[in-house]
Amino acid sequence: MPILSTKWGTMTTEITPSALRTPRAAAFAGIAFAVLFAIIVVLIHQAVPASPGDAGAWLTDPGRRGSVQFALELVPFCGISFLWFMGALRSRIAGPEERFFATLFLGSGLLFVAMLFALAALFGGLISIAALHGGRPPLDVWQLGSATTSNLTKIYAMRMAAVFTISASTIAWRLGLHHRTIAWAGYLVGLILLVAGTTIPWIEIVFPVWVLLVSVNILFLTYRQPILAIEGVDDLSTPTGD
């Protein structure tokens, strides 16, 4: 099969089936993660009170408790999709000049998934304890566990998501996988998650929205790339050197 070549700014990209499949895999995995994570955030926010220490009536409501349990069961698949998204993007990184951002990208992504699994396991354990006590768990146990999961989410996981967003935006821009506008949007999202992660309600939903935007953009560019190369178009997006 012939190899098509095109220039992305100052970069020259060889268009082969394997070169196209990798970013497409990242795009599909990113879309899956964004959808799953958004569902998890919405279900938990609708069922659980805003105050982490307030058990409230939702624990005695089987329907609301079931919604949270369903959301927690989606977490492993959400984490797998995110790891696939990371792996597909990371396979495109080459050259020693990208190692700094690649380290930030990998480290923050792995920490985000680890914290996501940890808080899901902890919160699931709290719900199990509440079910054993008829929806009224020991107050001290509930307050400790709920405060811990809230801190893991808002203080630590979201800040790791911020570092991941900033590093991923930088890498994708340098590789020509992003338009300049989407890269700047990533920097803005990262700054919001880094600074205002504990003060803005529903702040968690910003991260999957950004991943969805990035994934759709990558998917669009990978499908457009061979067409533009055949037509002799030089630039698919904003030059990386600009």
Image (tube, grey):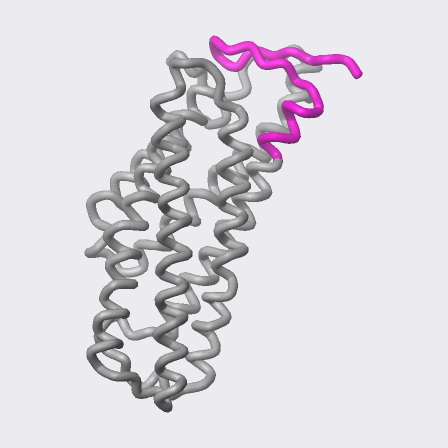
Q: Quadrant of the N terminus?
A: top right
Name the foreground residue: 123 vs 20: 123
Position of 20 relative to 230 (above/below): below
Rendering coords of residue 194 (x, y %):
24, 43
Of all residues shown, which one is farthest toward the right?
1
Answer with left or right where residue 218 lies relative to residue 168. right
Answer with left or right where residue 228 lies relative to residue 150. right
34 drawn magenta: no
Name the foreground residue: 94 vs 166: 94
21 drawn magenta: yes
Read off the magenta span.
Answer: 1-24
The quarter of the picture where residue 226 lies is: top right
Name the foreground residue: 25 vs 222: 25
Q: Residue at x 42, y 43 (%)?
A: 210
Answer with left or right where residue 192 lies relative to residue 97. left
Q: How many marks?
A: 0
Q: Residue at x 27, y 69 (%)?
A: 145
Rendering coords of residue 178 (x, y %):
46, 27
Rendering coords of residue 140 (x, y %):
20, 78
Q: Quadrant of the C terminus?
A: top left
Position of 52 relative to 62 (above/below): above
Rendering coords of residue 222 (x, y %):
61, 28
Of all residues shown, which one is farthest toward the bottom?
134
Q: Residue at x 47, y 9 (%)?
A: 10
